[in-house]
Image (cartoon, grey):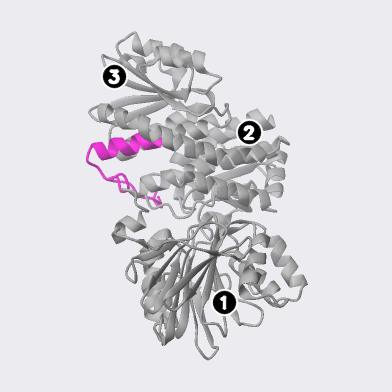
Amino acid sequence: MCGIFGIVTGKDEALGPLLVEAGKRLSYRGYDSVGCATLTSDGQVDLRKDVGRIEDVARRLAFHEMRGTRGIVQLRWATFGAPSQANAQPHLDSDGDLVGAHNGNVVNNVELREAFIGQGMVVRSTNDGETCVHAVERYVDQGFSMLDAIRHAYHDLAGDYAFVIGRVGENRLYAFKKGSGLVAGVTDGISVVSSDLPSLLPLTRRIVRVEDGEIVILEPGRIELRRVEDGRRIEREVEAITETMEEAQKGGFAHFMLKEIHEQPRRAGEMLHLYDASPHVAPLVERMKAARNLYLVGCGTSYHACLLGATYIARLAGRPAIPVLAPQFVPQYVPAVGRDDVGVFVSQSGETKDVLLALEAARGRGLEPLALINVIGSTLMRESRAYLPLACGYEISVPATKTFLNQALAFLYLALRMGGHSTAMLHTLPGLIEETIGAAEVAVAGLAESLARHDDLYCLGYGLTYPIALEGALKMKEVTYAHCEGMLSTEFKHGPLSAVTDGYPVIFVAGPEDVARIVSGVNEVTCRGGWAIAIGEEDPRLRANAHDLVVLPPAGPLFNPLLAVVPLQLLAYRLSVARGLDPDYPRNLSKTLTVD
Protein backbone atom coordinates (compact mmCIF):
# COMPACT_ATOMS: atom_id res chain seq x y z
CA MET A 1 0.00 0.00 0.00
CA CYS A 2 1.81 3.11 -1.21
CA GLY A 3 1.26 6.64 0.04
CA ILE A 4 1.29 9.80 -2.09
CA PHE A 5 1.23 13.49 -1.17
CA GLY A 6 1.34 16.56 -3.40
CA ILE A 7 1.41 20.28 -2.68
CA VAL A 8 1.04 23.46 -4.78
CA THR A 9 2.18 26.87 -3.51
CA GLY A 10 2.29 30.35 -5.01
CA LYS A 11 6.08 30.81 -5.07
CA ASP A 12 9.35 28.90 -5.01
CA GLU A 13 10.12 27.86 -1.46
CA ALA A 14 11.80 25.14 0.58
CA LEU A 15 9.38 22.24 0.09
CA GLY A 16 11.79 19.46 1.06
CA PRO A 17 11.22 19.58 4.85
CA LEU A 18 7.45 19.79 4.35
CA LEU A 19 7.45 16.80 1.99
CA VAL A 20 9.52 14.74 4.42
CA GLU A 21 7.12 15.46 7.27
CA ALA A 22 4.15 14.59 5.09
CA GLY A 23 5.88 11.34 4.10
CA LYS A 24 6.52 10.45 7.72
CA ARG A 25 2.84 10.87 8.48
CA LEU A 26 2.08 8.32 5.73
CA SER A 27 4.74 5.84 6.87
CA TYR A 28 2.27 3.87 9.04
CA ARG A 29 0.90 2.49 5.74
CA GLY A 30 4.14 0.55 5.19
CA TYR A 31 6.75 1.05 2.48
CA ASP A 32 10.13 -0.08 1.16
CA SER A 33 11.32 2.98 -0.81
CA VAL A 34 10.73 6.72 -0.86
CA GLY A 35 11.13 9.62 -3.26
CA CYS A 36 10.54 13.36 -3.60
CA ALA A 37 10.13 15.57 -6.65
CA THR A 38 9.87 19.35 -6.83
CA LEU A 39 9.07 21.61 -9.80
CA THR A 40 10.21 25.24 -9.85
CA SER A 41 8.68 28.28 -11.51
CA ASP A 42 11.52 28.40 -14.06
CA GLY A 43 10.93 24.82 -15.28
CA GLN A 44 13.40 22.78 -13.23
CA VAL A 45 12.50 19.30 -11.96
CA ASP A 46 14.42 17.92 -8.98
CA LEU A 47 13.84 14.18 -8.42
CA ARG A 48 15.51 12.22 -5.61
CA LYS A 49 14.56 8.69 -4.54
CA ASP A 50 15.93 5.42 -3.21
CA VAL A 51 15.21 2.27 -1.23
CA GLY A 52 15.10 2.69 2.54
CA ARG A 53 13.39 4.42 5.43
CA ILE A 54 12.32 7.97 4.82
CA GLU A 55 14.59 9.42 7.51
CA ASP A 56 17.66 7.66 6.07
CA VAL A 57 16.93 8.43 2.42
CA ALA A 58 16.05 12.05 3.20
CA ARG A 59 19.33 12.52 5.04
CA ARG A 60 21.42 10.72 2.40
CA LEU A 61 19.87 12.56 -0.56
CA ALA A 62 19.43 15.90 1.20
CA PHE A 63 15.70 16.24 0.69
CA HIS A 64 15.82 19.38 2.87
CA GLU A 65 17.52 21.23 -0.01
CA MET A 66 14.66 20.70 -2.44
CA ARG A 67 12.75 23.83 -3.53
CA GLY A 68 9.88 24.63 -5.86
CA THR A 69 6.29 25.76 -6.26
CA ARG A 70 5.05 22.18 -6.41
CA GLY A 71 6.17 19.01 -4.70
CA ILE A 72 5.34 15.30 -4.59
CA VAL A 73 6.46 12.69 -2.06
CA GLN A 74 5.72 8.99 -2.43
CA LEU A 75 6.28 6.01 -0.15
CA ARG A 76 6.22 2.80 -2.17
CA TRP A 77 5.04 -0.65 -1.08
CA ALA A 78 6.34 -2.80 -3.93
CA THR A 79 3.99 -4.84 -6.09
CA PHE A 80 5.18 -4.36 -9.69
CA GLY A 81 8.96 -4.48 -9.73
CA ALA A 82 11.28 -5.27 -6.85
CA PRO A 83 12.28 -2.52 -4.41
CA SER A 84 15.05 -0.57 -6.16
CA GLN A 85 16.15 2.97 -6.92
CA ALA A 86 14.78 2.69 -10.47
CA ASN A 87 11.40 1.40 -9.30
CA ALA A 88 11.08 3.94 -6.49
CA GLN A 89 8.63 6.76 -7.19
CA PRO A 90 8.01 9.48 -8.38
CA HIS A 91 8.80 8.87 -12.06
CA LEU A 92 9.57 11.09 -15.05
CA ASP A 93 8.21 10.87 -18.57
CA SER A 94 10.54 10.38 -21.54
CA ASP A 95 11.60 14.05 -21.79
CA GLY A 96 11.59 14.86 -18.09
CA ASP A 97 8.83 17.46 -18.18
CA LEU A 98 6.15 15.32 -16.51
CA VAL A 99 6.60 13.83 -13.04
CA GLY A 100 4.12 11.70 -11.15
CA ALA A 101 3.52 9.02 -8.53
CA HIS A 102 0.72 6.62 -7.72
CA ASN A 103 -0.81 4.47 -5.01
CA GLY A 104 -2.36 1.13 -5.97
CA ASN A 105 -1.98 -1.48 -8.69
CA VAL A 106 -2.21 -0.92 -12.44
CA VAL A 107 -2.91 -4.50 -13.45
CA ASN A 108 -2.22 -4.08 -17.18
CA ASN A 109 1.21 -2.66 -16.38
CA VAL A 110 3.14 -5.25 -18.39
CA GLU A 111 1.12 -4.76 -21.56
CA LEU A 112 1.21 -0.97 -21.37
CA ARG A 113 4.91 -0.92 -20.59
CA GLU A 114 5.67 -3.04 -23.67
CA ALA A 115 3.47 -0.76 -25.79
CA PHE A 116 5.23 2.37 -24.53
CA ILE A 117 8.66 0.89 -25.25
CA GLY A 118 7.44 -0.03 -28.74
CA GLN A 119 6.33 3.57 -29.26
CA GLY A 120 9.82 4.81 -28.47
CA MET A 121 9.21 6.14 -24.97
CA VAL A 122 12.06 6.11 -22.44
CA VAL A 123 10.95 3.54 -19.86
CA ARG A 124 13.35 3.38 -16.92
CA SER A 125 11.69 0.90 -14.56
CA THR A 126 9.26 -2.01 -14.30
CA ASN A 127 7.02 -0.11 -11.90
CA ASP A 128 3.38 0.67 -12.69
CA GLY A 129 3.74 4.17 -11.30
CA GLU A 130 5.92 5.00 -14.29
CA THR A 131 3.29 3.43 -16.53
CA CYS A 132 0.81 6.02 -15.23
CA VAL A 133 3.17 8.83 -16.24
CA HIS A 134 3.67 7.45 -19.75
CA ALA A 135 -0.08 6.88 -20.13
CA VAL A 136 -0.54 10.65 -19.75
CA GLU A 137 2.58 11.43 -21.83
CA ARG A 138 1.18 9.50 -24.80
CA TYR A 139 -1.78 11.88 -25.12
CA VAL A 140 0.16 15.03 -24.26
CA ASP A 141 2.49 14.17 -27.16
CA GLN A 142 -0.57 13.94 -29.42
CA GLY A 143 -1.46 17.54 -28.57
CA PHE A 144 -4.09 17.03 -25.88
CA SER A 145 -4.29 19.37 -22.91
CA MET A 146 -3.27 17.90 -19.55
CA LEU A 147 -6.91 17.56 -18.51
CA ASP A 148 -7.90 15.69 -21.68
CA ALA A 149 -4.70 13.61 -21.66
CA ILE A 150 -5.56 12.46 -18.14
CA ARG A 151 -9.14 11.68 -19.16
CA HIS A 152 -7.89 9.39 -21.94
CA ALA A 153 -5.15 7.84 -19.77
CA TYR A 154 -7.70 7.02 -17.07
CA HIS A 155 -9.46 4.61 -19.42
CA ASP A 156 -6.17 2.97 -20.45
CA LEU A 157 -5.10 2.19 -16.88
CA ALA A 158 -6.82 -0.92 -15.49
CA GLY A 159 -6.91 -1.70 -11.78
CA ASP A 160 -7.31 0.24 -8.55
CA TYR A 161 -5.11 3.29 -8.11
CA ALA A 162 -4.77 6.99 -7.32
CA PHE A 163 -2.26 9.16 -9.20
CA VAL A 164 -0.79 12.66 -8.93
CA ILE A 165 1.16 14.33 -11.76
CA GLY A 166 2.71 17.70 -12.55
CA ARG A 167 4.01 19.33 -15.75
CA VAL A 168 6.80 21.80 -16.31
CA GLY A 169 5.42 25.25 -17.14
CA GLU A 170 2.13 24.85 -15.23
CA ASN A 171 1.83 25.89 -11.61
CA ARG A 172 -0.66 23.17 -10.80
CA LEU A 173 -0.87 19.47 -10.03
CA TYR A 174 -3.48 17.01 -11.26
CA ALA A 175 -4.68 13.94 -9.39
CA PHE A 176 -7.27 11.29 -10.19
CA LYS A 177 -8.48 8.04 -8.70
CA LYS A 178 -10.05 4.71 -9.49
CA GLY A 179 -10.52 2.51 -6.42
CA SER A 180 -7.75 3.78 -4.13
CA GLY A 181 -8.14 6.55 -1.59
CA LEU A 182 -7.60 10.23 -2.46
CA VAL A 183 -8.37 13.38 -0.51
CA ALA A 184 -7.57 17.01 -1.31
CA GLY A 185 -7.26 20.01 1.00
CA VAL A 186 -7.02 23.77 0.67
CA THR A 187 -5.91 26.69 2.80
CA ASP A 188 -4.50 30.17 2.28
CA GLY A 189 -2.07 30.11 -0.64
CA ILE A 190 -1.65 26.33 -0.91
CA SER A 191 -3.54 23.23 -1.97
CA VAL A 192 -2.66 19.65 -1.11
CA VAL A 193 -3.65 16.12 -2.09
CA SER A 194 -2.88 12.77 -0.50
CA SER A 195 -3.76 9.09 -0.20
CA ASP A 196 -5.40 9.81 3.13
CA LEU A 197 -5.90 12.39 5.85
CA PRO A 198 -2.85 12.14 8.16
CA SER A 199 -0.46 13.93 5.82
CA LEU A 200 -2.92 16.81 5.30
CA LEU A 201 -4.07 17.60 8.83
CA PRO A 202 -1.09 19.69 10.01
CA LEU A 203 -1.58 21.91 6.94
CA THR A 204 -5.34 22.20 6.65
CA ARG A 205 -8.58 20.80 8.01
CA ARG A 206 -10.60 21.99 5.01
CA ILE A 207 -10.78 18.96 2.74
CA VAL A 208 -12.62 17.54 -0.27
CA ARG A 209 -12.92 13.79 -0.75
CA VAL A 210 -12.27 12.75 -4.35
CA GLU A 211 -14.46 10.00 -5.80
CA ASP A 212 -13.73 7.42 -8.49
CA GLY A 213 -13.84 8.88 -11.97
CA GLU A 214 -12.90 12.36 -10.80
CA ILE A 215 -9.89 14.57 -11.46
CA VAL A 216 -8.79 17.18 -8.92
CA ILE A 217 -6.80 20.17 -10.21
CA LEU A 218 -4.69 21.87 -7.55
CA GLU A 219 -3.57 25.51 -7.80
CA PRO A 220 -2.27 27.83 -5.05
CA GLY A 221 -5.09 28.15 -2.53
CA ARG A 222 -7.64 26.58 -4.89
CA ILE A 223 -8.90 23.14 -5.91
CA GLU A 224 -11.24 22.20 -8.73
CA LEU A 225 -12.97 18.88 -9.46
CA ARG A 226 -13.66 17.61 -12.98
CA ARG A 227 -15.41 14.51 -14.30
CA VAL A 228 -13.29 12.03 -16.22
CA GLU A 229 -16.26 11.15 -18.41
CA ASP A 230 -16.75 14.57 -20.01
CA GLY A 231 -14.40 17.02 -18.28
CA ARG A 232 -17.28 18.96 -16.75
CA ARG A 233 -16.78 20.74 -13.45
CA ILE A 234 -18.11 19.18 -10.22
CA GLU A 235 -19.36 21.33 -7.35
CA ARG A 236 -18.68 19.86 -3.91
CA GLU A 237 -18.68 21.50 -0.50
CA VAL A 238 -15.43 21.74 1.42
CA GLU A 239 -15.60 19.58 4.58
CA ALA A 240 -14.23 20.65 7.98
CA ILE A 241 -12.28 17.86 9.69
CA THR A 242 -12.15 17.50 13.49
CA GLU A 243 -10.35 14.12 13.72
CA THR A 244 -7.04 13.75 15.54
CA MET A 245 -3.96 12.44 13.76
CA GLU A 246 -4.28 8.99 15.34
CA GLU A 247 -7.96 8.80 14.42
CA ALA A 248 -7.11 9.75 10.85
CA GLN A 249 -4.44 7.05 10.58
CA LYS A 250 -7.02 4.52 11.70
CA GLY A 251 -9.55 5.87 9.24
CA GLY A 252 -11.96 6.71 12.04
CA PHE A 253 -11.85 3.17 13.48
CA ALA A 254 -10.97 2.61 17.13
CA HIS A 255 -8.20 0.12 16.32
CA PHE A 256 -6.15 -0.96 13.30
CA MET A 257 -7.56 -4.49 13.63
CA LEU A 258 -11.08 -3.21 13.05
CA LYS A 259 -9.93 -1.01 10.19
CA GLU A 260 -8.15 -3.94 8.54
CA ILE A 261 -11.23 -6.16 8.89
CA HIS A 262 -13.20 -3.48 7.06
CA GLU A 263 -10.51 -3.23 4.36
CA GLN A 264 -11.04 -6.85 3.33
CA PRO A 265 -13.61 -6.30 0.56
CA ARG A 266 -11.38 -3.77 -1.20
CA ARG A 267 -8.19 -5.78 -0.75
CA ALA A 268 -9.88 -8.94 -2.06
CA GLY A 269 -11.08 -7.05 -5.12
CA GLU A 270 -7.65 -5.57 -5.79
CA MET A 271 -5.98 -8.97 -5.62
CA LEU A 272 -8.53 -10.49 -7.99
CA HIS A 273 -7.98 -7.69 -10.52
CA LEU A 274 -4.23 -8.20 -10.19
CA TYR A 275 -4.42 -11.96 -10.76
CA ASP A 276 -6.79 -11.63 -13.71
CA ALA A 277 -4.22 -9.46 -15.51
CA SER A 278 -1.02 -11.14 -14.28
CA PRO A 279 1.08 -13.15 -16.76
CA HIS A 280 2.62 -14.98 -13.79
CA VAL A 281 -0.51 -16.87 -12.72
CA ALA A 282 -0.68 -19.33 -15.63
CA PRO A 283 2.95 -20.58 -15.34
CA LEU A 284 2.57 -20.99 -11.59
CA VAL A 285 -0.67 -22.94 -12.05
CA GLU A 286 1.04 -25.24 -14.58
CA ARG A 287 3.87 -25.95 -12.15
CA MET A 288 1.39 -26.85 -9.43
CA LYS A 289 -0.55 -29.12 -11.79
CA ALA A 290 2.59 -30.92 -12.96
CA ALA A 291 3.94 -31.63 -9.46
CA ARG A 292 4.36 -35.22 -8.33
CA ASN A 293 3.57 -34.07 -4.79
CA LEU A 294 2.23 -30.62 -4.01
CA TYR A 295 2.92 -29.22 -0.53
CA LEU A 296 1.32 -26.11 1.01
CA VAL A 297 3.57 -24.84 3.80
CA GLY A 298 2.93 -22.15 6.40
CA CYS A 299 2.70 -21.29 10.09
CA GLY A 300 -0.22 -20.14 12.22
CA THR A 301 -2.75 -18.18 10.17
CA SER A 302 -0.89 -18.98 6.94
CA TYR A 303 -1.10 -22.69 7.74
CA HIS A 304 -4.87 -22.38 8.16
CA ALA A 305 -5.01 -20.82 4.69
CA CYS A 306 -2.95 -23.76 3.39
CA LEU A 307 -5.38 -26.20 4.98
CA LEU A 308 -8.33 -24.53 3.29
CA GLY A 309 -6.33 -24.29 0.06
CA ALA A 310 -5.71 -28.04 0.05
CA THR A 311 -9.44 -28.66 0.34
CA TYR A 312 -10.16 -26.26 -2.50
CA ILE A 313 -7.53 -27.91 -4.72
CA ALA A 314 -8.87 -31.41 -4.08
CA ARG A 315 -12.42 -30.30 -4.73
CA LEU A 316 -11.87 -28.14 -7.80
CA ALA A 317 -8.75 -29.59 -9.42
CA GLY A 318 -9.22 -33.24 -8.44
CA ARG A 319 -5.74 -33.71 -7.04
CA PRO A 320 -4.25 -33.96 -3.57
CA ALA A 321 -2.27 -31.18 -1.97
CA ILE A 322 -0.55 -31.68 1.36
CA PRO A 323 -0.93 -28.85 3.91
CA VAL A 324 1.76 -28.90 6.56
CA LEU A 325 3.11 -26.70 9.32
CA ALA A 326 6.52 -25.40 8.29
CA PRO A 327 8.52 -26.80 11.27
CA GLN A 328 6.98 -30.24 10.79
CA PHE A 329 7.60 -30.20 7.03
CA VAL A 330 11.34 -30.71 7.56
CA PRO A 331 11.24 -33.97 9.60
CA GLN A 332 8.06 -35.36 8.08
CA TYR A 333 8.42 -34.69 4.34
CA VAL A 334 11.77 -33.19 3.36
CA PRO A 335 13.65 -36.54 3.45
CA ALA A 336 11.27 -37.81 0.76
CA VAL A 337 10.95 -34.79 -1.56
CA GLY A 338 12.66 -34.50 -4.93
CA ARG A 339 12.86 -32.59 -8.19
CA ASP A 340 9.35 -33.51 -9.30
CA ASP A 341 7.79 -31.99 -6.20
CA VAL A 342 6.51 -28.43 -5.69
CA GLY A 343 5.98 -26.49 -2.49
CA VAL A 344 3.86 -23.35 -2.09
CA PHE A 345 5.31 -21.45 0.87
CA VAL A 346 3.00 -18.91 2.48
CA SER A 347 3.96 -16.02 4.75
CA GLN A 348 2.48 -12.60 5.48
CA SER A 349 5.85 -11.02 6.25
CA GLY A 350 8.02 -13.13 3.95
CA GLU A 351 10.52 -13.33 6.80
CA THR A 352 9.03 -16.11 8.97
CA LYS A 353 12.05 -18.17 9.96
CA ASP A 354 10.23 -21.51 10.18
CA VAL A 355 8.99 -21.10 6.61
CA LEU A 356 12.39 -20.02 5.29
CA LEU A 357 14.13 -22.96 6.96
CA ALA A 358 11.60 -25.36 5.46
CA LEU A 359 12.10 -23.86 2.01
CA GLU A 360 15.88 -24.05 2.29
CA ALA A 361 15.83 -27.69 3.39
CA ALA A 362 13.39 -28.76 0.65
CA ARG A 363 15.17 -26.83 -2.09
CA GLY A 364 18.37 -28.62 -1.14
CA ARG A 365 16.70 -31.84 -2.25
CA GLY A 366 15.48 -30.37 -5.53
CA LEU A 367 11.92 -29.29 -4.64
CA GLU A 368 10.69 -26.28 -6.63
CA PRO A 369 9.65 -23.47 -4.24
CA LEU A 370 6.74 -21.18 -5.09
CA ALA A 371 5.29 -18.57 -2.74
CA LEU A 372 2.33 -16.43 -1.74
CA ILE A 373 3.68 -13.24 -0.17
CA ASN A 374 2.53 -9.84 0.97
CA VAL A 375 5.92 -8.12 1.15
CA ILE A 376 7.68 -7.62 -2.17
CA GLY A 377 11.44 -7.80 -1.72
CA SER A 378 11.17 -10.10 1.31
CA THR A 379 13.49 -13.05 1.77
CA LEU A 380 10.73 -15.49 0.83
CA MET A 381 10.19 -13.66 -2.46
CA ARG A 382 13.90 -13.76 -3.28
CA GLU A 383 14.30 -17.42 -2.38
CA SER A 384 11.27 -18.63 -4.37
CA ARG A 385 11.28 -19.69 -8.00
CA ALA A 386 8.02 -17.81 -8.60
CA TYR A 387 5.51 -15.97 -6.44
CA LEU A 388 2.20 -14.17 -6.38
CA PRO A 389 1.58 -11.05 -4.26
CA LEU A 390 -1.36 -10.89 -1.87
CA ALA A 391 -1.89 -7.16 -2.50
CA CYS A 392 -3.08 -6.49 1.06
CA GLY A 393 -0.93 -3.49 1.80
CA TYR A 394 0.67 -3.04 5.18
CA GLU A 395 -1.06 -4.85 8.06
CA ILE A 396 -0.33 -3.01 11.29
CA SER A 397 -2.38 -4.99 13.80
CA VAL A 398 -0.54 -8.10 14.99
CA PRO A 399 -3.52 -10.44 14.39
CA ALA A 400 -3.70 -11.20 10.67
CA THR A 401 -7.10 -10.54 9.14
CA LYS A 402 -6.98 -9.22 5.58
CA THR A 403 -3.83 -11.24 4.84
CA PHE A 404 -5.55 -14.48 5.87
CA LEU A 405 -8.58 -13.78 3.71
CA ASN A 406 -6.45 -12.98 0.65
CA GLN A 407 -4.27 -16.05 1.23
CA ALA A 408 -7.36 -18.25 1.30
CA LEU A 409 -8.84 -16.44 -1.70
CA ALA A 410 -5.56 -16.84 -3.61
CA PHE A 411 -5.76 -20.61 -3.09
CA LEU A 412 -9.38 -20.64 -4.28
CA TYR A 413 -8.34 -18.70 -7.38
CA LEU A 414 -5.46 -21.11 -8.09
CA ALA A 415 -7.65 -24.16 -7.46
CA LEU A 416 -10.21 -22.92 -9.98
CA ARG A 417 -7.50 -22.31 -12.56
CA MET A 418 -5.92 -25.71 -11.90
CA GLY A 419 -9.28 -27.36 -12.52
CA GLY A 420 -9.94 -25.39 -15.70
CA HIS A 421 -12.83 -23.42 -14.17
CA SER A 422 -13.69 -19.78 -14.71
CA THR A 423 -12.72 -17.33 -11.97
CA ALA A 424 -15.32 -14.75 -13.01
CA MET A 425 -17.64 -15.67 -10.14
CA LEU A 426 -15.01 -14.56 -7.63
CA HIS A 427 -15.69 -10.91 -8.44
CA THR A 428 -18.99 -11.11 -6.53
CA LEU A 429 -17.05 -11.96 -3.37
CA PRO A 430 -15.96 -8.45 -2.30
CA GLY A 431 -19.61 -7.35 -2.19
CA LEU A 432 -20.53 -10.43 -0.14
CA ILE A 433 -17.70 -9.73 2.31
CA GLU A 434 -18.96 -6.15 2.67
CA GLU A 435 -22.47 -7.45 3.35
CA THR A 436 -21.14 -9.94 5.90
CA ILE A 437 -19.22 -7.26 7.79
CA GLY A 438 -22.32 -5.10 8.09
CA ALA A 439 -24.52 -7.94 9.35
CA ALA A 440 -21.88 -9.47 11.63
CA GLU A 441 -21.08 -6.16 13.36
CA VAL A 442 -24.62 -6.16 14.76
CA ALA A 443 -24.79 -9.89 15.48
CA VAL A 444 -21.56 -10.22 17.44
CA ALA A 445 -22.01 -7.13 19.62
CA GLY A 446 -24.41 -8.86 22.00
CA LEU A 447 -22.49 -12.13 21.90
CA ALA A 448 -19.29 -10.39 22.93
CA GLU A 449 -20.88 -8.95 26.06
CA SER A 450 -22.05 -12.41 27.17
CA LEU A 451 -18.88 -14.27 26.15
CA ALA A 452 -16.47 -11.80 27.77
CA ARG A 453 -16.72 -13.55 31.15
CA HIS A 454 -15.72 -16.94 29.74
CA ASP A 455 -12.05 -17.95 29.77
CA ASP A 456 -12.52 -21.25 27.96
CA LEU A 457 -14.46 -22.13 24.80
CA TYR A 458 -14.30 -24.18 21.62
CA CYS A 459 -14.67 -23.33 17.92
CA LEU A 460 -15.65 -26.25 15.68
CA GLY A 461 -15.97 -26.72 11.94
CA TYR A 462 -16.23 -29.46 9.36
CA GLY A 463 -14.88 -29.85 5.83
CA LEU A 464 -14.28 -26.44 4.28
CA THR A 465 -15.08 -24.70 7.58
CA TYR A 466 -12.61 -26.71 9.67
CA PRO A 467 -9.69 -24.37 8.79
CA ILE A 468 -11.97 -21.43 9.61
CA ALA A 469 -12.66 -22.85 13.05
CA LEU A 470 -8.92 -23.12 13.62
CA GLU A 471 -8.39 -19.55 12.44
CA GLY A 472 -11.26 -18.22 14.55
CA ALA A 473 -9.89 -19.95 17.63
CA LEU A 474 -6.44 -18.53 16.98
CA LYS A 475 -7.85 -15.00 16.76
CA MET A 476 -9.64 -15.50 20.09
CA LYS A 477 -6.48 -16.71 21.78
CA GLU A 478 -4.37 -13.92 20.31
CA VAL A 479 -6.44 -10.95 21.35
CA THR A 480 -8.66 -12.08 24.25
CA TYR A 481 -6.14 -14.26 26.16
CA ALA A 482 -8.99 -16.75 26.68
CA HIS A 483 -8.33 -20.38 25.79
CA CYS A 484 -10.25 -21.16 22.62
CA GLU A 485 -9.63 -24.53 21.02
CA GLY A 486 -10.33 -24.97 17.33
CA MET A 487 -10.99 -28.46 16.06
CA LEU A 488 -12.97 -30.70 13.75
CA SER A 489 -16.57 -30.89 14.96
CA THR A 490 -16.74 -34.67 14.65
CA GLU A 491 -13.63 -35.03 16.83
CA PHE A 492 -15.22 -33.09 19.70
CA LYS A 493 -17.03 -36.16 21.02
CA HIS A 494 -13.72 -38.07 21.20
CA GLY A 495 -12.70 -36.44 24.46
CA PRO A 496 -13.20 -32.64 24.60
CA LEU A 497 -16.96 -33.04 25.05
CA SER A 498 -16.16 -33.80 28.68
CA ALA A 499 -15.39 -30.10 29.20
CA VAL A 500 -19.01 -29.09 28.54
CA THR A 501 -20.97 -27.95 31.58
CA ASP A 502 -23.93 -25.61 32.06
CA GLY A 503 -23.43 -22.50 29.96
CA TYR A 504 -20.14 -23.68 28.42
CA PRO A 505 -19.77 -21.87 25.03
CA VAL A 506 -19.09 -23.79 21.82
CA ILE A 507 -19.05 -22.03 18.43
CA PHE A 508 -19.99 -24.07 15.35
CA VAL A 509 -19.03 -22.88 11.84
CA ALA A 510 -21.51 -24.50 9.47
CA GLY A 511 -21.03 -24.85 5.73
CA PRO A 512 -24.30 -25.15 3.76
CA GLU A 513 -23.49 -28.74 2.78
CA ASP A 514 -22.70 -29.82 6.33
CA VAL A 515 -25.62 -28.50 8.37
CA ALA A 516 -26.96 -31.96 9.30
CA ARG A 517 -23.57 -33.01 10.63
CA ILE A 518 -23.13 -29.72 12.49
CA VAL A 519 -26.61 -29.99 14.04
CA SER A 520 -25.60 -33.38 15.46
CA GLY A 521 -22.63 -31.72 17.16
CA VAL A 522 -24.79 -28.85 18.37
CA ASN A 523 -27.12 -31.29 20.12
CA GLU A 524 -24.22 -33.11 21.76
CA VAL A 525 -23.43 -29.77 23.41
CA THR A 526 -26.93 -28.49 24.20
CA CYS A 527 -28.16 -31.72 25.76
CA ARG A 528 -25.35 -31.36 28.30
CA GLY A 529 -26.28 -27.81 29.14
CA GLY A 530 -23.72 -26.16 26.87
CA TRP A 531 -24.24 -22.90 24.95
CA ALA A 532 -24.21 -23.52 21.19
CA ILE A 533 -23.47 -20.59 18.85
CA ALA A 534 -23.73 -21.25 15.10
CA ILE A 535 -22.28 -19.27 12.21
CA GLY A 536 -23.79 -20.12 8.84
CA GLU A 537 -26.35 -19.33 6.19
CA GLU A 538 -29.99 -19.01 7.27
CA ASP A 539 -31.25 -22.55 7.86
CA PRO A 540 -34.24 -23.68 9.96
CA ARG A 541 -32.20 -26.55 11.35
CA LEU A 542 -29.52 -24.24 12.74
CA ARG A 543 -32.18 -21.80 13.95
CA ALA A 544 -34.04 -24.56 15.79
CA ASN A 545 -31.08 -26.29 17.41
CA ALA A 546 -28.50 -23.60 18.28
CA HIS A 547 -29.04 -20.99 20.95
CA ASP A 548 -27.64 -18.22 18.72
CA LEU A 549 -27.19 -17.99 14.95
CA VAL A 550 -24.92 -15.47 13.20
CA VAL A 551 -26.35 -15.41 9.68
CA LEU A 552 -24.11 -15.27 6.61
CA PRO A 553 -25.30 -14.20 3.15
CA PRO A 554 -26.25 -17.18 0.95
CA ALA A 555 -23.13 -17.75 -1.12
CA GLY A 556 -22.62 -21.50 -1.50
CA PRO A 557 -19.99 -23.86 -0.11
CA LEU A 558 -16.92 -22.34 -1.81
CA PHE A 559 -17.48 -18.79 -0.59
CA ASN A 560 -18.97 -19.76 2.78
CA PRO A 561 -15.60 -20.25 4.56
CA LEU A 562 -14.30 -16.88 3.36
CA LEU A 563 -17.40 -15.18 4.72
CA ALA A 564 -17.54 -17.23 7.95
CA VAL A 565 -14.13 -16.01 9.09
CA VAL A 566 -15.40 -12.40 9.24
CA PRO A 567 -17.78 -12.81 12.23
CA LEU A 568 -15.04 -14.70 14.06
CA GLN A 569 -12.58 -11.86 13.45
CA LEU A 570 -15.13 -9.33 14.66
CA LEU A 571 -16.08 -11.44 17.66
CA ALA A 572 -12.43 -11.76 18.70
CA TYR A 573 -12.03 -8.01 18.31
CA ARG A 574 -15.16 -7.17 20.33
CA LEU A 575 -14.20 -9.65 23.08
CA SER A 576 -10.74 -8.11 23.31
CA VAL A 577 -12.18 -4.62 23.71
CA ALA A 578 -14.80 -5.86 26.22
CA ARG A 579 -11.98 -7.31 28.31
CA GLY A 580 -10.15 -3.99 28.30
CA LEU A 581 -7.31 -5.21 26.04
CA ASP A 582 -5.55 -3.70 23.01
CA PRO A 583 -6.29 -6.03 20.07
CA ASP A 584 -3.61 -4.42 17.91
CA TYR A 585 -0.72 -5.35 20.18
CA PRO A 586 -1.45 -8.53 22.17
CA ARG A 587 1.13 -9.47 24.77
CA ASN A 588 4.03 -11.77 23.97
CA LEU A 589 3.39 -11.68 20.20
CA SER A 590 5.21 -10.21 17.22
CA LYS A 591 4.02 -9.53 13.66
CA THR A 592 7.09 -11.19 12.16
CA LEU A 593 8.65 -14.27 13.79
CA THR A 594 12.33 -14.52 12.96
CA VAL A 595 13.35 -16.91 15.77
CA ASP A 596 13.03 -20.66 16.20
Q: Is residue 242 left or right of residue 124?
A: left
Image height of 34 relative to 447, above or below: below
Point out the frontmost of discs 2 and 1. Answer: 1
Image height of 471 relative to 110, above or below: above
Image coordinates of residue 109 in percent, x first then y, are 66, 61
Q: Are there few (<14), some (14-19), or many (20+) residues within 10 Å of tag 1? A: many
Kindly identify the amino acid type of the residue bearing the numbered disc 1. Val
- Nearest the eye: 238 or 596: 238
- How far apart, in angstroms, are the residues tagged by discs 3 and 2? 36 Å
Using the image, tell me which numbered label, if any, was put on residue 504: 3
- Nearest the eye: 392 or 376: 392
* Residue lying farthest to the right in this orientation: 118
Q: Which residue corresponds to mark 2?
A: 313
Instruction: Answer whether residue 229 is visible to the viewer in this image.
Output: yes
Using the image, tell me which numbered label, if any, was put on residue 99: 1
Q: Earlier in the sequence, mark 2 or mark 1?
A: 1
Residue 584 part of the magenta segment = yes
Q: Secondary structure at mark 1?
A: strand
Kindly identify the amino acid type of the residue bearing the numbered disc 3. Tyr
Q: Earlier in the sequence, mark 1 or mark 3?
A: 1
Labels in figure, total? 3
Q: Which residues are magenta?
A: 568-596
